[in-house]
Image (cartoon, rainbow, N blue to C red):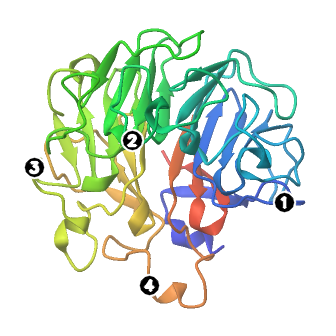
Amino acid sequence: MDYTTLGDKVTNSYIFKGSQRKPFLAPRGVYVANNMLFVSDTGQNRVFIWHTIPKSEFQEPDVILGQEAIEDSGRNSNEAVSSKTLHYPSGIWSDGKKLVVADAWNHRVLIWHTIPTKNAQPADVVLGQPNFENNHPNAEGQAADPKANTLNWPYGVFSDGECLWIADTGNRRVLFFVDIPTQNFVKADKVIGKPNFETRDYENNDPIWPYSIKINEKGVLAIADTQFYRILVWNDKNEAFNKQADIIIGQENFDNSGQNQFRLEPESNTLNWTYDACFYKDGILVNDTGNSRILVFNDIPNRNNENADTLIGRPDFNTSSEYKDNLQGTSSAIYWSFSINTENDKLFIADTGNHRLVICDLQT
């Protein structure tokens, strides 16, 4: 990788590809807690855990979830779905004690009450399905209406250590649980983006395709609304259940939904298939996936369509994913990154299109 492509906002950068015996394939989720690294190796239907942050290009994981051995990668371990299997895992959350995984294509979320210590360790709780052996959309099949306890392509999860939020992407909503559930098939307490739990229809001022949720220490809520190329921000997470977002990043208003705002090239205020965001200090980092860059806002915007202060991953605001340095391949720079996370001043990028992580220090 040409680390200069990341720009001067970061330093001490290196790449991490997971196991040398069977490296990452399109990792779509990364999370760090208490110096532990969690990665959804999405293309190989497994989640890795490292007890400490790896410092080299390859390091064998301490624990593998979804598969028995490092060589394995089958959907649901090439067997029937169970408490030990995964199919296209995506979003991850942990506080270093509990673990929550969005098992997207099994239409469920799995919870481990304690950090797993052995490969293919069964989950303790399943949400979205009545049991571990069921994996239908909305529990009963694609034609079934959503309910307070069903899921359809859940890609994102987040918790503050007490409550739980699930990006129920296929149902175009975010489910909220007052407590992290300890039993299967628990009903959500509230919903963001819908007037009730059974509604399928949607409005432009609601999250259209919510992919990830992040909340900072002050209670500011950000939802990556991928299909409308925007980030929706509520200044108070508790108000998201009954009002539209306070701020839109990436669009001028709720009715606009243009890819890069229908411009020929990206700019400092446009987005293209944004899949994640991450709060950092007083601001927010926006993972502008389709433009293969991360937009840096030093402060959380206080008006719609604000310009980013700087960026990571491209030489300027007008350079997109496809540019001259990619003619011989994409590995010289980040390419279609799906997930970002910070711990202290360190940034972790799931560089999905290049099948690796990029780990670096943020310049403060």
- Badge 2 amino acid: Thr
Q: Tell me the distance, in whole angstroms, between the alpha carbons under discs 4 and 3.
A: 29 Å
Labelled pair 4, 3 in contact (Cβ < 8 Å): no
Q: Residue 323: which numbered mark, if any?
A: 4
Q: Position of residue 156 (x, y in %)?
A: 48, 38
What residue is shown with label 1?
Answer: 22
Give the residue at x 90% y 60%. Answer: 21
What residue is shown with label 2?
Answer: 169
- Badge 4 amino acid: Tyr
Left-right relation of 184 to 315: right
| 274 in relation to 36, above or below | below
- Badge 1 amino acid: Lys
Q: Tell me the distance, in whole angstroms, between the alpha carbons under discs 2 and 4.
A: 31 Å
- Badge 3 amino acid: Asn
Between disc 4 and disc 3, the foreground one is: 3
Give the residue at x 44% y 71%. Answer: 314
Counting residues from the N terminus, which is met first, the one under dot 4 or under dot 1? Answer: 1
Labelled pair 2, 4 in contact (Cβ < 8 Å): no
